[in-house]
Image (cartoon, rainbow, N blue to C red):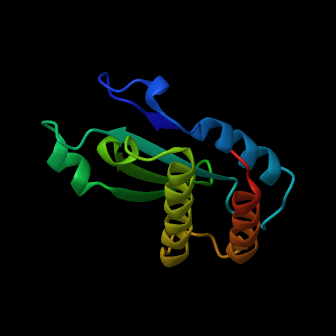
Amino acid sequence: MISLPGQIHRKNFKFDLQKLQSYLTNKLAHKQFGQGLTEVCFRFGIFKFDGQATSYFESSEKNLAYSTKTQSLYITRNIDYNIIAKLNKDELFKYYKEIFRENIELIAASRKVPKKFDLAAFKQSFYNYLDAYMP
């Protein structure tokens, strides 16, 4: 899920996160990683951090939540548009890969992963598919 404020237009992006999302979803959909977690959702909020709400978005740069009802894990990351606007397609993909890896490590460091979920296997598969992706 990607949030874009009104002053930022999707046509300005040099890399399509939604294509990467579809690729990863298709690759991981047939895999089994145990029980207790049915969805891992990475949310990216892309904002210009030089606006009025800068302090709010910087203070909530990373957020991890687990829903027992849906057995879903949600990781929200706020990204500064001013940074990604300067990157070319390859640099932007590398930047997003680093954020995905940080997100996986955030999951590993949290206590929100069900004990019957094989995070190590998920992590390995996720990294393999992420590294194999060709934008």
Q: Is residue 97 above or below residue 10?
A: below
Q: In which quadrant is the C terminus drawn?
A: top right
* Position in image of residue 128 (x %, y %): 76, 66
Residue 11 appears left or right of 27: left
- Between 97 and 86, the one lying in front of the other is 86
Q: Is residue 9 above or below residue 90?
A: above
Number of disc labels: 0
* Position in image of residue 72 (x %, y %): 60, 52
Q: Which residue, as the protein is rendered here, is positioned at the far right?
A: 30
- Identified at 31% across, 39% down, the residue is 47
Q: Is residue 23 above or below residue 109?
A: above
Which of the 4 image quadrants contains residue 71? bottom right
* Position in image of residue 103 (x %, y %): 51, 63
Residue 29 appears left or right of 16: right
- Identified at 68% across, 73% down, the residue is 119
- Identified at 76% across, 73% down, the residue is 121
* Position in image of residue 62 (x %, y %): 37, 58
- Identified at 58% across, 40% down, the residue is 17
- Between 60 and 88, the one lying in front of the other is 88
